[in-house]
Image (spheres, helix red, strand yellow):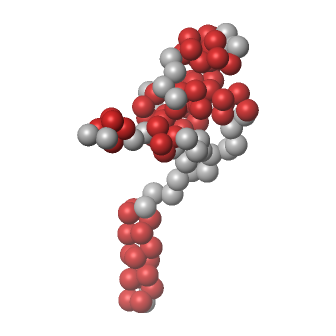
Amino acid sequence: MTPRTRSRARAAAAAADAEPAAAPVPPLSRTQQDVLRCLVRGMADKEISAHLQLSPHTVDYHLRQLRKRFGARNRVQLLLASRGLVPEAAAQLVSPSRRTGT
């Protein structure tokens, strides 16, 4: 391997380490999108269930599938991981001090 090739290989490895490639997320189903929107709005599981006219078990199932899909362990991680998929998520994830204007 020539010195030039070696330096290119090192540069490519460093770039790969610096920015891990995000795994592409398959499209969400309509129900998953609806559940995610409700979650972004701060609704609890029972509120999501009533709002979407689904059973609590179905809401729980979709939340588990969404957490699995995004590699999230809890609701907060799921919200952070899904920011780009739900347009209103960016506005909802503003710190409390910015919401109240203090």
- Number of on-image labels: 0
Determine the image quadrant of residue 50.
top right
Q: Is residue 24 above or below residue 39?
A: below
- Residue 12, by quadrant, is bottom left
Compared across the picture, whether 28 is left or right of 60 comes to right
Q: What residue do we see at 59% from left, 41% from top?
A: 86
**Residue lying farthest front?**
101
Whether residue 50 sits left or right of residue 75 in the image: it is: right
Residue for point 46% across, 37% down: 92
Residue at point 59%, 18% (across, down): 48
Q: Quadrant of residue 16?
A: bottom left
Whole-percent x and y of residue 82? 53, 41
Residue 25 is situated, as x and y percent measured from the top left of the image, at 62, 46
The picture places residue 42, in percent across and down from the top left corner, at: 48, 25
Whether residue 81 appears in this view of the structure is no
- State the quadrant of the C terminus: top left
Quadrant in which the N terminus appears: bottom left
The foreground one among 102 and 44 is 102
Q: Is residue 75 visible?
A: yes
Q: Left of 82 or right of it: where is 80?
A: left
Q: Position of residue 66 (x, y in %)?
A: 58, 31
**Where 64 falls versus 19 (above or below)?**
above
Q: At x 39% / y 41%, what residue is drawn?
A: 94
